[in-house]
Image (spheres, rainbow, N blue to C red):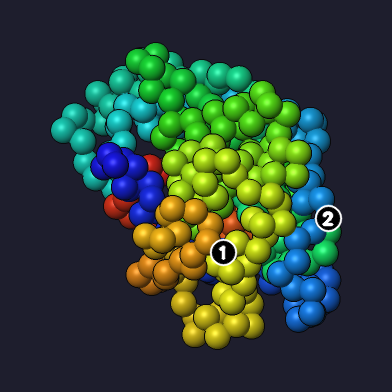
Amino acid sequence: MTELSKARRAAVTALLAAGLALVTAQAAHADPAAHADTSTQGAAPAQGATEPVPAADLARAHSAVQDPTVLDKVGHFFARKGVPPTRQLTIGAAEEAKAAQDEAPRLAGNTVPVYTLDAGFVAGTPGAPVAKAEFTASKVVAADGQTASVWTVRQGDAWRVVNIASGGDESDYAAKAADGGGTAFREPQVNAWYVLRDGRVLPLDDEARRSVGADGVSLAAYQKLVHQRYGDKLPGSTYDREGRGGGYRLDAAAEAGPGAAPQAAPQAAADHDSAIPAVTAAAALGATALAAAGVGAGAVLRRKRAIR
């Protein structure tokens, strides 16, 4: 595993329990029944299909990324080549500005919704989708071939750019899933990308293959799997009341398939206050770009950099 992959995994395994708790808590605020403990908890929803994001919203998100100020920040991101903004480069500000301009960042392809494992699905809420769209991503390419993913979220009637991430996983996996008529989504707790297709959850990356096997599992089996992993860490649980916000890793047995339980990873400090809307801060940024909330450094900033 490369240093960058390790950095991404470290970022992904941080603060996920807090993320699931916030998502479910927000849903429960709108529907008090969401917290009900029923005898059907742990049963898979009949469909699990994700809700599509309107094309008009994707177009507005795309336009937000095209703003010259945003593209300038992406240029600086490329010019710094992964060095966090908190660390000084060996070149001066003028040289960095010229390098950013020379990168000439441009959008490549369409803006796509990024779906994340839904807490209602984990809890076994009837009819809950397997994942919900938490933000949109637009791939940007530099003159020297570097790529980045620019994240946007809707705040009121406007779309706000909240993060720049190295690479293009979000767009690449969405395109790969769409080629076969499915929808890509991620289980950020284990940094896994899947495709939901014809009632089955199939792996798109190595982490997902370790989670569900090379052939994937049925939607019902996947629901039971994630309920086993995270069902006792939702709001109101002992885990939640103790204020723990750790990530998760698959143990040696689970890496061979979905049959074994995970182990808790080292705990990390959680910050529930964020400039990002609660649902996004929980499910998306809770696993990645916490710099936007003034939280996170090191490995997070090597993979993700927030636009301020």
Residue identified by numbered label 1: 19
Mark 1 lies on a secondary structure that is: helix
Q: Earlier in the sequence, mark 1 or mark 2?
A: 1
- Asked if 78 appears above or below 36 in the picture, the reply is above
Image quarter for residue 87? Answer: top left
Placement of the N terminus among the 4 image quadrants: top left
Q: At 69% across and 50% down in the image, what residue appears?
A: 218
For image coordinates 76% across by 39% down, the residue present is 198
Question: Residue 188: in sight, yes or no?
Answer: no
> How many badges with numbers are in the image?
2
- The residue that label 2 is drawn on is 46
Side of 28 relative to 23 (left or right): right
For the residue pair 90 and 145, the one nearer the viewer reads as: 145
Q: Is residue 222 above or below residue 29?
A: above
Expressed as whole percent of the image width and height from the top left, the position of residue 108 reads 56, 19
Amino acid carrying mark 2 in the image:
Ala
Residue 143's x, y, as percent? 39, 14
Question: In the image, what residue occupies the spot 26% across and 31% down?
Answer: 93
Q: Secondary structure at mark 2?
A: loop
Marks 1 and 2 sit apart, C-alpha to C-alpha, by 25 Å
Residue 229: image location, x then y, percent: 55, 67
Residue type, label 1:
Gly
